[in-house]
Structures are given as C-alpha cells and as structure tokens.
Image: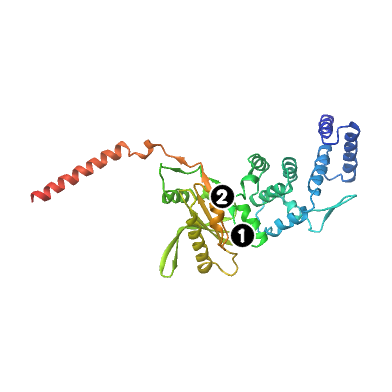
Amino acid sequence: MLSCQRTEHRAVDRGPGYGGSVKSRGFIKRTEVLQNEFPDATGFSARNLWNMKKWYLFYSSSDIFSEMAHTIADSMDLNSLKLQQVGAEISENQKLQQPVAELEFPTIFGFVPWGHHVEIVTKCKTIEEALFYVRKTIEESWSRSILVDSIKANSYQSSGNALTNFAEKLPTIQGKLAQEIVKDTYDFGFVSLPVGYDEEALEDALEQNITRFLLELGSGFAFIGRQKEIIVAGKTRKIDMLFYHIKLRCYIVVELKAVSFEPEFAGKLNFYVNAVNELMKSESDNPTIGLLICKDKDQTEVQWAFQGIETPMGVATYDNIRLQEIKSQLPSEEAIQKRLEQAEEEYILKLKEKNK
C-alpha cells in the first residue's frame, strides 16, 4: 500500500502545475476524504484525481464542446448499438458542478471506459480529435489497446480527408458523418494482383476478400452486390459495387478505377447515384452517396469536375496492392504437360478426320 501511494505521489508531482510536494499531499488528502465519504466506491487514487482534473480542463477549455458532442450523439443510434463496453446510465441534463463553470456531461461519454478517456485526453491535441476517438470507441467497441494503436497510427488524420462535396450537398449532420466515414486513401494490402491488372481483376479480388474490404471501408457498410444491374431507358447498366450504410441510412455507389482520376469519371458516377435515387431509394432513405476509388487523383481536377454536380460524392485513392511475381503467373509444369497432351490428342483427331 505504501509503495503504491508513493508511486501515485510521484505521478502527481510530475503533473503540469503540480510540482510541489504540498500540492501532492493535497491530492493524497483528498483521496482519503473521498474514500471515507464513499467507502463502496473505487478510483480515488491521487493519480486518478489528477487524471479527472486533466479530463475536465481538456474539455472545459472549448466553448463548442457541448454542441459538438450533442451533434455526434444525435447522429448515433445508441439504442441499437451492441456495446461490448459497459456504459453508465447518465441523463443528458446531468452536469459536473464546478466553482466557476459547469461542464455538461454528454450521454455518449458514459459508453466509454474511464481508461479510454484518460488515453484520449492525454494523447489528443484538439476537441475534434478527441471526440473522433470517443465515437470510434463506441461504434466499433474498441479495446484500450486498439484505441492506443489507432491514435499512434493517426487514424483521425487519415479519416475524412477524401475530396468530397458532402458539406455543400448534404444536411449538416449527415454531411459531417459522411465526411468522417470516407478515407483519403484505402489500404488494399490484402489484395494480390498481376502486373497490369484491370478494373475487373480489382473488383474480383475485392469481392473475394469482401470481409477484409468491409473492414477497410469501416463500420456501417453493408455489401449489396457487385455489377449491380439497373435498367434506364431500356438499357442495362452495371454499378461496380453497391453498399448500404446503416448509420447514414443511405445507398453508397462505389466505382473502382485501376487508373488515375479523369474528369469524365465524375459524370458517370453522378449518373449512377441519380439512377439509384430514382429506382432503389425509398422515402425513408437519405440521399444516395457516390464514392470513386481510383489509383491516383489531382485535387484541382476533382474540384473542377465536381462543379455543377448536385449529387453528394467523393473521390479517394487506394494503395499497397501486392503485385504477383511473374513466376506465380506462369502455368505449372503439370498444367503445361496436360496442355501438350490435349494438343497432341487434338492433332491426332484432325489427322483421322482428314484421312477419312
């Protein structure tokens, strides 16, 4: 017990603004008072009290914290989430009272374990970044180790950076959520293709690895089909891949290109989005979104191609496709032998027919 208390004492000493031992002893004293006041409760160590103060100061420093937190909560269906974390039942109107200010405690925070909260406020630099990881923890039931790994990998920076027109073409809340779910670059490292592969080969590989593809797209995507047929003016058209996003409550048309972005790609995607809106979307669905994933893109070309288009769409890229070695693309010795035998049989048959 003494060893633990000394460790906590040193931890508080290292906290910003709490270098003096008098301050540290004050935290230790508060720990004893709280433990006596709430004998059945735990978590009142000096270290934890410092973390509580750090948590409060982090969020109370922003004037728009409550508005942002409620915007996120409004876009989430908390009743349908299958949470693996145990969330506290907290009323939206409950507040943490402070001598100088009040900080409204968002309902969604009750679904995030305290250890996760500590990691978030310790490692995140902005309120926006912190709320991004709070949301991901809830939606994807992240363990603490996954959360830490995601922060180290800068998931916040890589998510929501695709070039889109969502902010202009979708309602505010849906536009923000749609922007969050699309990435600037998708990692197709789970796909192996031959040199010079085309779009059909890319589609084949993604369909064969659909589980991995869905994981890369992120939570909420439901796969409807590949080469989805739609009939417009008596002509059959085929959409590369069609998804439905459960949280956004809308169809998402995904077009794949094994080449760099070309302006005409936006027009074709716009056509498919409009077609799905007319032929498949119900009254309860939100507007369909288009997502073009290509090998590379130029920002200016994408922005100019979007001008005049009213449908919500985005353009992203992909990388890390593993190119198959030439040897793996060649037929095996057994396959060659079998083909030679077939060729010999065919030749003998032709000779027999000729001599008849």
Q: Which residue type does callout 2 highlight?
A: Gln
Q: Which residue is mark 1?
A: 248
Colour scheme used in the picture?
A: rainbow
Q: Which residue is mark 2?
A: 299
Q: Residue at x 87, y 46 (%)?
A: 38
Quarter of the image where one finds residue 233 = bottom left
Looking at the picture, tell me which residue is in the foreground, 283 or 300. 300
Where residue 36 appears, as percent x and y from the top left, is 90, 42
The image's mark for residue 256 is none
Q: Is residue 268 above or below residue 113?
A: below
The answer to whether one can see residue 73 in this image is: yes
Looking at the picture, tell me which residue is in the foreground, 183 or 347. 183
Is 281 on the left-hand or right-hand side of 17? left
Q: 10 Å neighbourhood of mark 2: few (<14), some, or many (≥20)?
A: few
Where residue 105 appears, as percent x and y from the top left, is 79, 53
Q: Earlier in the sequence, mark 2 or mark 1?
A: 1
Q: Residue at x 75, y 40 (%)?
A: 122
Is 353 on the left-hand or right-hand side of 225? left
Q: Secondary structure at mark 2?
A: helix
Look at the image and tell me in which quarter the N terminus lies. Answer: top right
Q: Which residue type does callout 1 highlight?
A: Leu
Q: Residue at x 45, y 51 (%)?
A: 203
